[in-house]
Image (cartoon, rainbow, N blue to C red):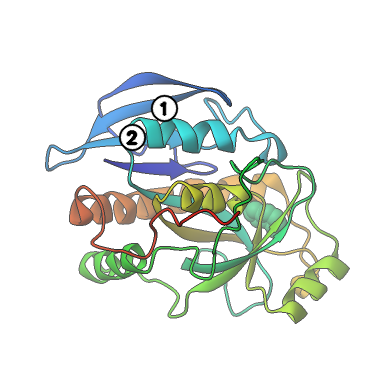
Amino acid sequence: MLAIIGGTGVYQLLGESEERELRTPYGDVTVTLSRLANGREVIFAPRHGKGHSVPPHRLPSRALLFGLHEAGVRAILSTSAVGALSTDLAPGTLALLGDFMDFTKSRETTFHNGPDVVHQDVTEAYCPTLRGALRDTAKELGIALHPRDVVYVCTEGPRFETPSEIRAYRMLGGDVVGMTQVPEVVLARELGIHYAGVALVTNLAAGVEGSRPSHREVLELMAHSGETVSRLLLGCAERVGEGPACNQCEVPEGMS
Ligand code: HPA
């Protein structure tokens, strides 16, 4: 089974659906079960909960990922709102995530808290096969994607960044900034779930061309482009069926 994790604003992704409570040792989360046009079941999980009520630094990521895995999910397509670290990525641009940098501070970022010591390889955190499927789908549907997969800088939030922080992230090689990819992508990889992410640039990050980001601006851009992102994710979900033919995202041997 495949799941779609929607970020800010992508709530009306699916038609008829049924709510499901996923109960886990890490807490409970509510997702919706629906069907794609080809009849396959798909799970939709609004990342910030119903009504966008959970802030990014308090997302129950372990409950969500664990619950999805228990429900039989083997592949995840996600979408996230991001700020651009340079004017190369104009607001409205869609880009695939290629790598991340973690600047979060207070989150539970692993399922491996001992006694086994596990060092998860995240050299290729985003599933290369799912990324390829997203590119193929975008081409087929005539949806423009940024030519290069981008580096996502994950900040703690909920505040936006300072212009100095943004300058530093740009110097370090980041392309976009957001608050939600970590630990989501890491936890997916720990569970052996294939994971790919589409970033929607909602704004220029703080200080880029004098920008002052606002939550209103983020929501407005998401409302405007949410439908395109939805078409891309659903089209890709139909294309990959039960999951991508990929042997790179499996659960690794534990190291102890
Ligand atoms: N910074 C952090 N997160 C974001 C931004 C931003 O500028 N835009 C959308 N999510």
Query: Are the residues tagged 1 and 2 within 8 Å (C-beta)?
Result: yes
**Drawn side of residue 202 relative to residue 154, left or right:** left
* Side of 184 relative to 10 (left or right): right
Give residue 43's mark: 2
Quadrant location of the C terminus? bottom right
Query: Could you say where residue 229 lies in the image, as x and y percent from the top left?
Result: 39, 54
Which secondary structure, mark 2? strand
Looking at the image, residue 208 lies above or below residue 6: below
Disc 1: which residue: 31
Can residue 221 be seen? no
Q: Quadrant of the N terminus?
A: top left
Q: Position of residue 22 (x, y in %)?
A: 44, 22
Residue at 59% across, 80% down: 88
Residue 129: x percent and y percent?
A: 31, 67
Residue under the point 81% across and 74% down: 168
Q: Looking at this view, name the residue that lies furthest to the front.
A: 256
Q: Whole-Å distance between the Cαs marked 1 and 2?
A: 7 Å
- Horizontal side of 196 relative to 202 (left or right) equals left
Q: As rendered, which of 210 and 5 lies closer to the eye? A: 5
Which circle marks residue 175 in the picture? none
Q: Residue at x 52, y 44 (%)?
A: 7
Q: Is residue 226 above or below residue 13?
A: below
Q: Which residue type does callout 2 highlight?
A: Ile
Q: Name the residue at 12% across, 37% down.
A: 39
Q: Depth check: 183 or 42 in front?
A: 183
Cβ at disc 2 under 8 Å from ligand 1: no
Residue 58, above or below 51: below
Amino acid tagged 1: Val
Where in the figure is residue 52, as x and y percent of width and height? 58, 31
SS for callout 1: strand
Local crowd size for mark 1, using a 10 Å CA cut-off: few (<14), some (14–19), many (≥20): many
